[in-house]
Image (cartoon, rainbow, N blue to C red):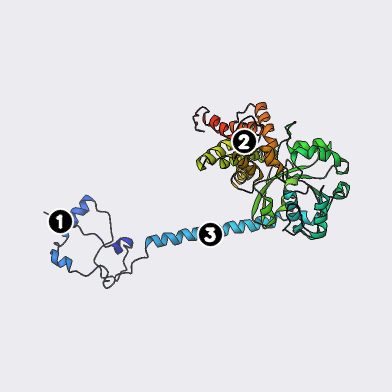
Amino acid sequence: MAALILEPSSSSFLNPNFPSNSTNTHRPYLPLTKKSTLLHRIHSPPAPPLSLRCSATPASTSLPGDQDPLPDSSSERTRDRRRAVRLAWEKLVRWSRSWRNKAKTDVLERTNKIVVLGGGSFGTAMAAHVAERKSQLEVNMLVRDPQVCQSINENHYNCKYFPKHKLPENLIATTDAKVALLGADYCFHAVPVQFSSSFLAGIADYVDPGLPFISLSKGLELNTLRMMSQIIPHALKNQRQPFIALSGPSFSLELMNKLPTAMVVASKDKKLANAVQQLLASDHLRISTSSDVTGVEIAGALKNVLAIAAGMVEGMNLGNNSMAALVAQGCSEIRWLATKMGAKPTTITGLSGTGDIMLTCFVNLSRNRTVGVRLGSGERLDDILSSMNQVAEGVSTAGAVVALAQKYNVKMPVLTAVARIIDNELTPKKAVFELMSLPQVNLQPLW
C-alpha cells in the first residue's frame, strides 16, 4: 500500500520553531526513524486527489500565523564574511598604530648631517629622500663631476641623472671629501663596487672610526670576491667600522617619484639597524630590518647576473615559458650558494632576495636586464657598455660568482653561462642549447 510521508515546507525547514499561537498544525522537522516513519504513515490522513493538490494554495501565499521566511542564507554568509574581513582589517590597523607609537624615536631629531658618497642615480634618490625627511638636516653629496656639482648647488637638479626632478634645497653637492665627511652622523655609500676600494682608500683619512656606513652598492669585487661588508672595513683599515646594507626592490626613478617602496636594512648590530630604519622610514618607503648581512648582500649581487640572463631570453624572443623556467632555476642557484655561505633561506625568498630578483629580471628599467636584452639581440658587449651612462654591476659580478661557486662547490649552470657569454666564449644561442641539454632532474620532496 502506498503511503504519503509529509515533508515540511522550505520555510519550516529553515525555521522549525513556530510561535505558540500559530495555527499551523505541522510539527517541527525531525529525522524520521523506522519506528516514527511507521507511526507517521498509520496516523496520516490519506493523500488528497491529484487535482486537489494541483489547485491548492500556491507556496508563495502565506497562511495565518505563518512566520516570514529568513533572508537567503548566501546573503547572510556574504555579510558575515565581509564583517569578518572588516574586523580583521581594523585589528591590523590598530596594531599598526600602536606599534608606530611605541617605535617612535628621536633618531631623526638627533641627526644633523648626512653624507652620500657618489652622485649616481640611486645615491641622488636616497639623498633627496633623506633631505625631505627634515628640512633642517644638512645633506652633502660627494661627487666627482664638477658640472653635476654646479647643477645641484645652483639649480637643484642633477643634470646627468635627474634633469626633471627638483632636489630639496638642503641637499648640497661638493667635490671635497673632507668637507663632505666633516661632522657627518651617517654615510651612504653609493660608489660602484669595482671602484669602491680605491675610492675609500683615498678618503680614509677623513672618515671618523665610528661613522656608520650604509651601503647602497650591490655586487662582488672581482679579484677578491669580497662583498661591501668586507670591502669597506678593509679599505678604511678599520674592522670595527659600523656597517649596514640597504637592499631590496627599488628603482631610483620610482623613489624620486615617491611611489610606495619597501627595502631592507641589514646589520649585525640590531640597535644600529633599528636606528637606520627610523631614519629612512616614511609614508612611501617601508623599511624592514635583518641581521642576515650575508644573505642580503649575496642576493643583491647575484640577482644582477640573473637579470642579464633574463634579458637575453627577452632579446632572443624565447617566450614566457623559458623566462619562468630560467628565473626559477636562477633563484635556486642563488639560494644554493647563499646558504652554503651562511645565509638564511628565508632571506633569499624574502624582499631583498626574490623581491629584488623579480623587479630586476622582469622590468625594463633594469640596467642589467637591458644589457641582456641587447646581448640576446646580437649586439656586442663593448658597444652596449660604451653606450650606457650607468654601471651594470652584473657584468663584472658574473666572473666573481663563478669563482665563488667553485670555492663552495656549488653547480650554477645559468649564472656560469652568463659569465661565459660576457667573456665572449659562448653565444646566447649556444648557451640555450647547452642548458636545455643538461641531465633531467628528479625533484625530491622535503619530507
What residue does disc 1 label?
3
Q: In which quarter of the image is residue 12?
A: bottom left
The quarter of the image holding the N terminus is bottom left
What residue does disc 3 label?
87
Picture coordinates of residue 412, whole percent (x, y): 60, 31
Residue 338 vertical placement versus 189 (above, below): above
Q: How far apart are marks 1 and 2 (CA)?
A: 75 Å
Please tell me which residue is depicted at 28% across the width and 56% down the height of the picture: 30
Counting residues from the start of the chain, the first of labels 2 and 3 encountered is 3
- On screen, residue 411 versus residue 61, left or right, reads right
Q: Nearer the viewer, residue 315 or 198?
A: 315
Q: What residue type is labelled 2?
A: Ile
Residue 261 vertical placement versus 353 (above, below): below
Pointer 2 and pointer 3: residues touching (CB < 8 Å)?
no
What residue does disc 2 label?
334
- Asked whether the viewer can see residue 291, the reply is no
Q: Which of 272 and 382 is in front in this view?
A: 382
- Asked whether the viewer can see residue 244, the reply is yes
Picture coordinates of residue 172, whole percent (x, y): 82, 55
Label 2 crowd (10 A; few <14 / some 14-19 / many >=20) = many
